[in-house]
Image: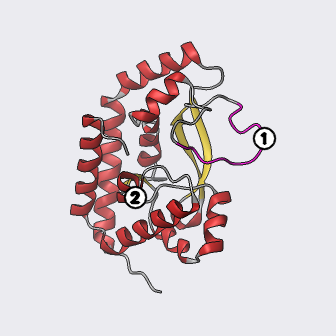
Amino acid sequence: MVIQDGMNRFERFIKRMFDFLCSFVGLILLSPVFLLVSISLLLQNKGSIIFSQERIGYKGKPFKIFKFRTMHVDSEHEGMPKLAVKGDERLTKVGKFLREHHLDELPQLFNVLIGDMSFVGPRPERKYFIDMIKKETSDYDYIYQMRPGLTSMATIYNGYTDTMEKMLIRLRMDLDYLQKRSLFLDLKIIFTTVLYILTGKKF
């Protein structure tokens, strides 16, 4: 199977400029939210406010993704990567609130700013889980044609990918996005994501 990118070079350039400008403005406008969340985490959590983890991104290159810390420091004390699930017992009280309202993802605006990520694209995954997916299908390599995203159709409609079945559904949705993606579709996905967050709709 050969999958063609729905965006041409010029559209990809415009997409990157949009990402850079909007993430820069977003970091400034949302700075009071960053401060409030940071204070809340300082009052409850041990460990750092910002959680970073290696993910695989554009062209298969690893990068550090940033999030507000939502889990206890020893959440993977056994040394094995674990998928986050709904009602995860590893979440702190503040972390649970941040997850429910997707505020834990805000530091990824910095990832978007420096070009590791985009506003719209497949969610970046850890190599451990990518290797598991590749045992099922080799199509995952097409994902590397896109920068990972803060949101996507799969993020909105597939929910938590806490099983291999959901991982494969997410992959099919992300590959469908690759073929059909356009600047208009990106705006539609961003609008839908913001609308869901503001109205409290779970995804």
Q: Secondary structure beneath disc 2?
A: helix
Q: Residues within 10 Å of mark 2 (few under 14, many from 20)?
A: many
Give the amino acid type for the residue marked by disc 2 in the picture. Ala
Q: Nearer the viewer, residue 4 or 11?
A: 4
Specify the farthest residue to the top. 43
Which residue is the extreme one toward the right?
78
User: Which residue corresponds to the image point at 37% horizontal and 72% vertical from the top-left?
Assistant: 176
Is residue 76 in the magenta section?
yes
Labels 2 & 1 near each other (Cβ < 8 A) = no
Q: Nearer the viewer, residue 97 or 21?
A: 97
Left or right: 37 with respect to 138?
left
User: In the picture shown, does residue 141 fall above or below 78?
Assistant: below
Q: Which x, y percent locates residue 86?
A: 51, 41
Residue bearing mark 1: 78
Q: Label 1 neighbourhood size at 10 Å, few (<14), some (14-19), many (20+)?
A: few
| N-terminal label among 2 and 1 | 1
Q: Nearer the viewer, residue 9 or 198?
A: 198
Name the spot of residue 120 as percent of width and height, x first.
Answer: 36, 55
Q: Which residue is mark 2?
A: 154
The span from disc 2 to disc 1 (Cα, nearest Å) is 30 Å
Task: Report the magenta residues as a range.
Answer: 74-85
